[in-house]
Amino acid sequence: MAKGSSAAMVIQVKVKPNARASLIEETTDGVWLAQLKSQPIDGKANEELIALVAKCFGCPKSAVSIKSGASGRIKRVCIQTA
């Protein structure tokens, strides 16, 4: 790997908005399930998802991005690792 570059990990996340509590867990089939308190309005649920994934993987929010599915319930999330 080139000097200064970083690796990326992509996970598939199924999102359930309007949950009582925010949590994320990996299911047996390798898909992650994220329950979010936020409603899917004005990108609030996506912001909460990014913060939740960053906390779960111990990385800054700037290292997490939504690659695809930003407006759907199934998303591909990219996590930059050192």
Image (spheres, rainbow, N blue to C red):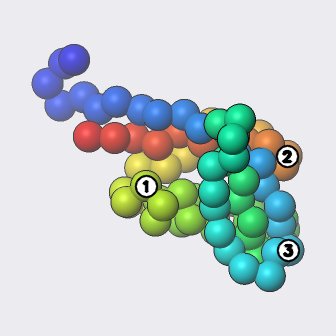
Number of numbered discs: 3
Q: Residue furthest bottom?
A: 20
Quarter holding residue 59 = bottom left
Residue, disc 1: 57
Q: Is residue 70 visible?
A: no
Residue, disc 3: 18
Q: Mark 2 or mark 1, which is nearer the start of the sequence?
A: 1
Q: Mark 3 or mark 1, which is nearer the start of the sequence?
A: 3
- The residue mark sitting in front, 2 or 3, is 3
Q: Secondary structure at mark 1?
A: helix
Instruction: Work out how far the residue at label 2 is from the one at label 3, CA to CA, in angstroms.
Output: 14 Å
- The residue mark sitting in front, 1 or 2, is 1
Q: Mark 3 or mark 2, which is nearer the start of the sequence?
A: 3
Instruction: Work out how far the residue at label 1 is from the one at label 3, CA to CA, in angstroms.
Output: 23 Å
Looking at the rendered image, the quarter that the C terminus falls into is top left
Rate crowding at label 3 as few (under 14), some (14 to 19) or many (20 or more) other CA atoms within 10 Å.
Answer: some
Q: Amino acid at mark 3?
A: Asn
**Residue 26 location (% of width, % of height):** 63, 49
**Residue 14 location (% of width, % of height):** 77, 48
